[in-house]
Image (spheres, coloured by chain):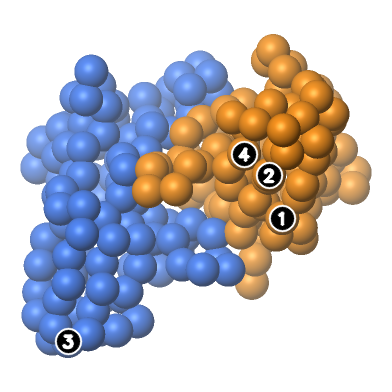
Chain colours: A blue, B orange
Amino acid sequence: NAGVTQTPKFQVLKTGQSMTLQCAQDMNHEYMSWYRQDPGMGLRLIHYSVGAGITDQGEVPNGYNVSRSTTEDFPLRLLSAAPSQTSVYFCASSGGQDSLFFNYGYTFGSGTRLTVV
Amino acid sequence: DQQVKQNSPSLSVQEGRISILNCDYTNSMFDYFLWYKKYPAEGPTFLISISSIKDKNEDGRFTVFLNKSAKHLSLHIVPSQPGDSAVYFCAASAKSGANNLFFGTGTRLTVIP
């Protein structure tokens, strides 16, 4: 049972480069989200999706783009990397229903550590 | 503006004793609260949650208490074990199944054998 799979695990980018962080889940979850974790700031929501074809912005969306063409995949695109985007990125998914959310919460991937130089 | 606050960055407890991790929130619209546990180089894992219609939820050694009037919740771990050593995040949501999960900054718990 893979759960939520994120690739790559580590990435170094130069300022101005673009890249896509991959996220895939095999639990048929409707809800998927991207978070970033920075020291002293906890996890902050970047973008989220409530189903295929539906996405919306979270707390810190600037500089990032998402799309959701399938239930399984939710890639995060960095359009033009900046040093301020150096962070650990987590993808998460949830069944989206009251009982699933309450009992199981969100399932997180193991993270992508991104450094922008 | 941090809507969920964990004011203690770290906590050390002897094995077998109780660990109490605290969390405060400012948004009165929050109605679901969750605790996550995180080991280094891994993603957070769901531990326990509570709805605002309850004031206590228990799961084995873990109990979460909610005081809505004080906008405060706490996680009790009894008895504490060395394997509980991790960073614990408190999180809150304004709507069930919602995507906007607000996290605290985390408390690093160390259980001393």
Gap between marks 2 and 4 measured at Cα? 5 Å
* Above or below, comparing residue A9 to residue A61 in the picture: above
List the residue tagged with mark 4. B85
Whether residue A66 is visible, yes or no, is: no
* Above or below, comparing residue A103 to residue A89 in the picture: above
* Residue type of the residue flagged with mark 3: Thr
* Residue type of the residue flagged with mark 1: Ser
Measuring from the top left, give residue A94's x and y in whole percent.
37, 30
Gap between marks 3 and 4 measured at Cα? 37 Å
Gap between marks 3 and 2 measured at Cα? 38 Å
The chain carrying label 1 is: B
In this rendering, which labeled residue sits more in front, label 3 or label 1? 1
CB contact under 8 Å: marks 2 and 4: yes
Residue neighbourhood size for the residue with mark 1, other residues' Cα within 10 Å, grouped as few (<14), some (14–19), many (≥20): some
CB contact under 8 Å: marks 3 and 4: no
Horizontal side of residue A104 vs B33, given as left or right: left
> Residue A15 shows which numbered tag?
3
Gap between marks 1 and 4 measured at Cα? 11 Å
* Above or below, comparing residue B105 to residue A55 in the picture: below
Residue neighbourhood size for the residue with mark 2, other residues' Cα within 10 Å, grouped as few (<14), some (14–19), many (≥20): many
List the residue tagged with mark 2. B110
Q: In which quarter of the image is the N terminus of chain A?
A: top left
Whether residue A99 is visible, yes or no, is: yes
Q: In which quarter of the image is residue B95?
A: top right
CB contact under 8 Å: marks 3 and 1: no
* Residue type of the residue flagged with mark 4: Ser
List the residue tagged with mark 1. B10
* Above or below, comparing residue A114 to residue A73 in the picture: below
